[in-house]
Image (spheres, rainbow, N blue to C red):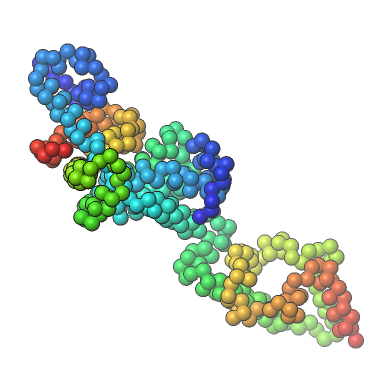
Amino acid sequence: MTHLTADELVDIAEGTRPESAASHLAACAACRAVLAELRATMSAITDADVPEPSPLFWDHLSRRVHEAIEADGQLHVAPAPHAELGGRLAALVGARAFQAALVACASLAIVVLVTSQMHAPSPAPGVETAIALPAPGVDLFSDSPIENDTPLALVATLASNLDVDASGAVPDAGLSHIGSADHAVAHMNGVELRELHRLLQQEMTP
Amino acid sequence: MAAPDPGLAGLDERALVEACLANEPGAFDLIVERHRRSVYQLCYRFVCNHEDASDLSQEVFLRAYRGLRNFRGQSSIATWLYRIGVNVCLNRVSTKVPASEPLGDRQLERQFVDRRAESPSDAVLRAERSARVRAAIAQLPRKQRATLILRTYHEMSHQEIADVLGSSVGAVKANFFHALGSLKKLLGDEPV
């Protein structure tokens, strides 16, 4: 005599296969006993609830998930080529400290650039040096020159995510203050810069 | 947390996933809100305590978010989340022995279960019975446990469970059969 398989017994216990479909069952007390035990156990465990947590828990869980995703997203959002480095550094050292360091790096880069210009070989005496300014119509703040300059592009990318106004690091970094002359120059448009250029050349011409 | 756009509530599952992928504010929060209870209950049944279930639920949703682009819509979001949940839970229980709730939490359980027609003594007995059954389920082998939980408490079909566990329908039924037999032995003759 072949007893019912586990598959058949489960189907009968769950009611997806009628008992009448298994003629063996009527003749086999052992299979009937197994079937009865299956049904009894299924019935006994169905009512075993999970304890309901506090009603406040669900919103707390949602908030936790949201915050975890936000924290995770800062490291997983597809970054610009140099921005991922910035994001990881920021995560490591903390946002404010990173902003301060970034401002300091930008300042240092500017100082290095200016210093290198100051120490460039001087033109021979008698040779007139013109201040190189863009031709009319050229936007000084266009991205294209930066894209061709890898170190400058790195500084620009790192600084692009920096909320300078919100960073308390700005005053400490020695950058220009609103109302100062260098702040005004930094915020001039192309037309204003060309006018400044004209005035400076006028003043400097003997 | 940004308040979900009221228009999101009417979206079907596929559209909601699309909204998540389009970085629509609140779209994934809505998925969490819809499925947090069932995911938490799944996790609780594996680990038998609130703290671990809470941590695991967070992990399930975090993994779901990371893998959202891989969701093809061939199953429901619930089934997909269960698949992630089972994997997360099985990884956890393979490294950690489930710790059941201390007595104080059982008192909490009684406090929050809403059985208004139930007498206090019946509620106590039922809570103790439930705790005993959960503890017995926690002793089952991993696949038997996963099969029994998904079949009995999440009403998944044998085929869906087979998809979640990466096995055949026959294997799922066999696991279910053996899980019930093992539970019968673990619970003994105690009235359950």
**Seen in the image, is A92 located left or right of residue A105?**
left
Q: Which quadrant is the C terminus of chain B positioned in? A: top left
Residue at the image position 53 percent from the left and 72 percent from the top: A96
Find residue A123 and report its horizontal and vertical position in percent. Answer: 79, 82
The answer to whether one can see residue A88 in this image is yes
Number of numbered callouts drawn: 0
Front position in the image: A96 or B110:
B110
On screen, B173 above or below A110? above
**Seen in the image, is A118 located left or right of residue A138?**
left
Residue at the image position 71 percent from the left and 77 percent from the top: A178
On screen, A92 above or below B108? below
Find residue B100 and report its horizontal and vertical position in percent. Answer: 22, 52
Find residue A198 and report its horizontal and vertical position in percent. Answer: 87, 75
Residue at the image position 19 percent from the left and 35 percent from the top: A44
Front position in the image: B3 or A64:
B3
Find residue B184 and report its horizontal and vertical position in percent. Answer: 14, 36
Front position in the image: B17 or B40:
B40
On screen, B91 above or below B161? below
The answer to whether one can see residue B178 in this image is no
**Seen in the image, is A22 located left or right of residue B23?**
left
Front position in the image: A47 or B145:
A47
Residue at the image position 31 percent from the left and 44 percent from the top: B114
The part of the image, by quadrant, that contains residue A106 is bottom right
